[in-house]
Amino acid sequence: MDPTLGTHTDGRPALRFERRLKHPPELVWRAITEPEQLRAWYPIRALTIDLRVGGRIEFEGMHAVVTQLDPPRVFAFSEHAPPEMQRESDDLIHFTLTPDGDGCLLVFTHVFDDRPAAASYGSGWNLCLNALLAHVNSEEFRMERPSDAHHEQLIHQFALDQGSVTPVGDGYQVRFERQLTRPVEDVRAALGDLDADPSVRIELSQGTGHGARLELTQTVASEADADLDGWRQRIEDLVRRVTAG
């Protein structure tokens, strides 16, 4: 099941996943709280877990703090973003396990800062949760990069392809911010004449994961001159060029 994108009580975006597992909560609990099992499916390598509220979790390159603990039902922790993740602060990871017949229902929630990254997080977590299911089922799972198609599906599902128009000075600013799945150099090579108009400014930077972040702005004289549909289509064309190879 694809995730839903909502808003957490603190106002930040929140992704929510549901997975039904054929195993009881006690078995799945070990897969999410024991470092050696967490390493089998979690995207960041877990080293140690001090399993108590306020306890520290050591990952390779970052750390987290346990914020909720109710075995074998609720496990939550706050990840402190490393310096290279400048768009994030302290993400919240939350697991709830509810008995469901002979198995259980897993509800996984990720609360974060960088809303344009929601599709990237969504497609990535989808793979990780599939790996978790395979792990508890004692099945082999080949972890690959998230698919471009699923990423773009979530871009549209979450309305992350929509631009904005805001008053600025004597005119208006058109703005799009779009997470892509390919590196900055690939996107730059595929830009073509997207920024041929001197009123258009395009910035490319490292985004979430391995892909580039595209930020496009244009200043226009009136709100009627803001061609959001046209720019959205041109960005879609760019995405197709970049991912075609």
Image: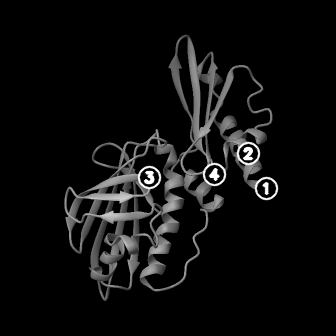
Reading the image, the residue beneath label 2 is 186
Earlier along the polypeptide chain: callout 4 or callout 1? Answer: 4
* Label 2 to label 3: alpha-carbon separation: 27 Å
- Write the residue at 69% across / 36% down: 230
Residue 75 drawn at (x, y percent):
27, 65
Q: Which residue is mark 3?
A: 61
Q: In this rendering, is residue 177 above or below 22?
A: above
Mark seen at residue 181: 4
User: Is residue 48 shown left or right of residue 234?
Assistant: left
Quadrant (top left, top right, bottom left, bottom right) of the C terminus: bottom right
For the rendered model, the colour scheme is one colour
User: Residue at (61%, 54%) from the top-left corner?
Assistant: 152
On the image, the x and y values in percent for residue 23 come to 35, 85
**Tag 2 near tag 3, CB within 8 Å:** no
Amino acid at circle 3: Gly
User: For the residue labelled by badge 4, is the local secondary structure a helix, a strand or a loop?
Assistant: loop
**Which of the two labelled residues, at mark 3 and mark 4, occupies the earlier sequence position?**
3
| Left or right relative to 43: residue 90 | left
Which residue appears at 49% of the width and 42% of the height?
Answer: 84
Mark 3: few/some/many CA within 10 Å (<14, 14-19, 20+): few
Crowd around label 4: few <14 · some 14–19 · many ≥20 (10 Å): many
Which image quadrant is residue 198 in?
top right
Circle 4: residue type: Thr
Label whose residue precedes the other's in the sequence (3 or 1):
3
